[in-house]
C-alpha cells in the first residue's frame, strides 16, 4: 500500500506522518481492546457504538472532520521514497487514537458509499 507521507525520528523512535484514504483505513483497522480476563494487555476501551454511529452519520451527511487518527504499524517495515511511504499490503492498522472516528467512517460506508471518494 502506498501512502503520501514522510518519516521523522523523535527520541530514537521512528514515526511516520501520512495521509490514507478512508476506505483503506476502514478495511484494515484493528483495535486492541482491554478486557480484564481475555486481553489484559489491551489499551483501548470498548467502542461506544452510539458515539461511532453519530460520527458516521455526521460524515455521511457531507460534513468533514479535521481530526487525525493515530495508528501503530506493529513492527512493519516501511519504505520511504520521494514523499511516498510504502507499507506491506497485508498490514493491520492498530488504532491508538481515533477508534470512534474510524468506526464512524465504517458506519458511514455502510449508510452510503461515501468513503470511496474521501
Image (cartoon, rainbow, N blue to C red):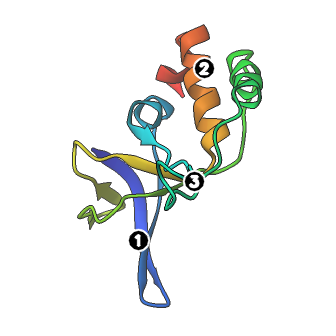
Callout 1: SS = strand
Which residue, given by chain and number where applicable, does mark 2 sit on? 107
Give 51 or 17, whichever is nearer the viewer: 51
Q: Are marks 2 and 1 in contact (CB under 8 Å)?
A: no
Q: Does residue 74 appear to the left or right of 112 in the view shown?
A: left
Classify 59 as above or below 44. above
Q: Quadrant of residue 66?
A: top right
Residue in view at x 43 percent, y 82 percent: 13
Give the residue number, with chain letter if any, for mark 3: 36
Q: From the viewer's perspective, is residue 113 above or below residue 92?
A: above
Q: Earlier in the sequence, mark 3 or mark 1?
A: 1
Disc 3 or disc 1, which is closer to the eye?
Answer: 3
Query: Which residue has dot 1 on it?
Result: 7
Image quadrant where residue 79 sits: bottom left
Q: Closer to the observer: label 3 or label 2?
A: 3
The residue at the point 63 percent across, 47 percent down is: 98
Between the residue at mark 3 and the residue at mark 1, the CA separation in whole angstroms equals 35 Å
> Residue at position x 33%, y 57% from top?
84
Residue 105 horizontal/vertical position (percent): 59, 28
Secondary element under disc 2, as helix, strand or loop, is: helix
Check disc 1: other Cα within 10 Å, few if <14, some if 14-19, many if 20+.
Answer: some
Of the numbered discs 3 and 2, the one sitting upstream in the chain is 3
N-term mark: 2 or 1: 1
Classify the position of the N terminus by image quarter: top left
Q: Is residue 54 left or right of residue 99?
A: right
Q: Secondary structure at mark 3?
A: loop
Q: Is residue 116 found left or right of 96 in the rendered image?
A: left
Nearer mark to the viewer, of 2 and 1? 2
Residue 82 percent across, percent down from the top left: 30, 63
Residue 72 screen position, x and y as percent: 44, 59
Q: Does residue 83 lie above or below 56 as drawn?
A: below
Amino acid at each position: 500500500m502506498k501512502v503520501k507521507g514522510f518519516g521523522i525520528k523523535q527520541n530514537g523512535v521512528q514515526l511516520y506522518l501520512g495521509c490514507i484514504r478512508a476506505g483503506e483505513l476502514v478495511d484494515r483497522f484493528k483495535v486492541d481492546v482491554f478486557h480484564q480476563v481475555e486481553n489484559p494487555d489491551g489499551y483501548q476501551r470498548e467502542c461506544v457504538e452510539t458515539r461511532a454511529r453519530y460520527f458516521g452519520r455526521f460524515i455521511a451527511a457531507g460534513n468533514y472532520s479535521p481530526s487525525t487518527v493515530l495508528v501503530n504499524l506493529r513492527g512493519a517495515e516501511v519504505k520511504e521514497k520521494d514523499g511516498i511511504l510504502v507499507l506491506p499490503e497485508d498490514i493491520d492498522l492498530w488504532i491508538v487514537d481515533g477508534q470512534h472516528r474510524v468506526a464512524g467512517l465504517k458506519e458511514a460506508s455502510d449508510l452510503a458509499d461515501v468513503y470511496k471518494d474521501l
